[in-house]
């Protein structure tokens, strides 16, 4: 039985005692050096098959990002968010989970979804909002979701998934399900009220959830030092009574080990764990952003030397688990696969315009019927402006 006496752990002092920032030193777990060499005396608990697939999915994620940023610049899709430099945080953490675990993502975790088996064509169908898009074009690009893969659909507002993850994990606990929830978010989202509500709820109700924060240094264009004065996000977990781990987010082995450990704790002790992954966003925040306005090329170059894919590749080569020629061939195949999926999805028709309302409301309100009717007349009047939609009117 938990002790509900809030004074039970409080010590008494007879002098003014000020707790200053930095009193608690939170270490950062690092297993691989930036050069890809193992550090410390604890070898990573990972087999060749898992390690090779982790690298493959990280590489696929980068190829996907490069192709889709280019597609957005060409006007083929409206929006994209790349995860360049942060691939280890999403892929290695997803690799340490069970497929039964629920993932609630922000919008830079395409690597976690790819690890779960989301195909290149599924990525493209969603981004082109075509007939095969599960969202039927009612979401922005990169708002993926898949029920079969236990990956909750992404929403645009920041941090909404954090209290939702606490609630979902509480439901898993009450149902006796042998699984946890992992919730991704950036350090900027931790400035939202939902972060505090979600962590407090999970701590008080002992929810088996991992809160995984990608601290990439910038919330859109605001550097971390202008967002908060405390010791990152990890210190907040301690303040809420949540078990906390800080890791090098560009080190795939550290991410994997920490997530595996956090999952064991969350499941066996039925409690939340906060992981703060210290990483860096090498890409722009989105295709609507120009990072040259708020950070220097020298800063970016410093972090490029910590590239998680280069770092992990070096370790795999040292283990004899990676062949350079095979790597080049695989990258060529990935680029062709992504490009083919893009071209195919781009040619697919869109969902019927009526789905905007008929697939949302059981009984469509009169005012929406009038709006749909007016929209159809507009499209019929200017069919050349809406080539795909004009052919999908009922």
Image (cartoon, grey):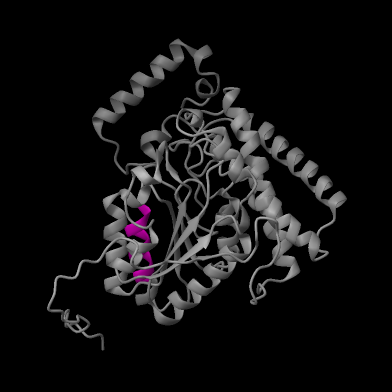
Q: Is residue 155 placed above or below 141 in the rendered structure?
A: below
Q: Residue at x 22, y 82 (%)?
A: 9
250 sits left or right of 5 in the view: right
Residue 73 x/y as whole percent:
58, 24
201 sits left or right of 208 in the view: left
Q: Is residue 367 magenta?
A: no
Q: Residue at x 74, y 39 (%)?
A: 335
382 sits left or right of 301 in the view: left
Q: Is residue 138 or residue 331 the one in the foreground?
A: 331
Q: Is residue 202 placed above or below 335 in the rendered structure?
A: below
Q: Residue 106, can we see it?
A: yes
For residue 36, which quarter of the picture?
A: bottom right
Q: Residue at x 53, y 69 (%)?
A: 258
Residue 10 x/y as whole percent:
19, 80
Range shown magenta: 159-171
Q: Residue at x 52, y 74 (%)?
A: 261
Which quadrant does the N terminus fall into? Answer: bottom left
Q: Is residue 166 magenta?
A: yes
Residue 313 x/y as whole percent:
74, 55
């Amino acid at each position: 039985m938990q002790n509900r006496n809030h004074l039970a752990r409080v010590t008494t002092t007879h002098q003014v005692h000020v707790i200053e920032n930095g009193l608690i030193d939170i270490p950062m777990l690092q297993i691989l050096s930036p050069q890809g060499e193992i550090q410390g005396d604890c070898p990573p608990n990972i087999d060749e098959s898992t390690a090779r697939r982790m690298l493959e999915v990280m590489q696929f994620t980068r190829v996907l990002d490069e192709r889709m940023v280019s597609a957005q610049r060409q006007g083929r899709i409206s929006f994209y968010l790349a995860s360049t430099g942060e691939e280890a945080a999403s892929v290695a953490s997803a690799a340490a989970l069970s497929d039964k675990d629920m993932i609630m993502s922000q919008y830079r975790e395409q690597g976690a979804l790819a690890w779960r088996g989301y195909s290149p064509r599924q990525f493209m169908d969603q981004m082109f909002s075509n007939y095969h898009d599960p969202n039927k074009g009612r979401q922005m690009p990169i708002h993926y979701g898949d029920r079969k893969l236990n990956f909750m659909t992404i929403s645009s507002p920041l941090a909404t998934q954090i209290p939702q993850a606490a609630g979902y994990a509480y439901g898993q606990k009450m149902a006796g399900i042998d699984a946890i929830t992992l919730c991704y978010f950036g350090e900027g989202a931790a400035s939202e009220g939902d972060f505090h509500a979600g962590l407090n709820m999970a701590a008080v109700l002992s929810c088996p959830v991992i809160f995984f924060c990608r601290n990439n240094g910038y919330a859109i264009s605001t550097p971390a030092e202008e967002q908060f004065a405390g010791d990152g996000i990890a210190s907040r977990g301690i303040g809420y009574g949540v078990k906390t781990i800080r890791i090098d987010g560009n080190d795939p082995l550290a991410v994997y080990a920490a997530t595996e450990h956090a999952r064991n704790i969350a499941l066996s002790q039925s409690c939340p764990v906060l992981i703060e992954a210290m990483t860096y966003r090498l890409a722009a925040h989105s295709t609507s952003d120009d990072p040259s306005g708020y950070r220097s090329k020298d800063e970016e170059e410093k972090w490029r030397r910590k590239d998680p894919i280069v770092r992990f590749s070096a370790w795999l080569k040292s283990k004899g688990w990676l062949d350079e020629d095979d790597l080049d061939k695989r990258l060529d195949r990935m680029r062709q696969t992504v490009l083919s999926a893009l071209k195919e999805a781009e040619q697919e028709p869109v969902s019927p315009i009526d789905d905007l309302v008929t697939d949302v409301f059981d009984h469509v309100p009169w005012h929406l019927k009038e709006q749909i009717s007016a929209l159809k007349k507009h499209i019929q009047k200017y069919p050349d402006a809406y080539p795909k939609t004009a052919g999908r009117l009922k």
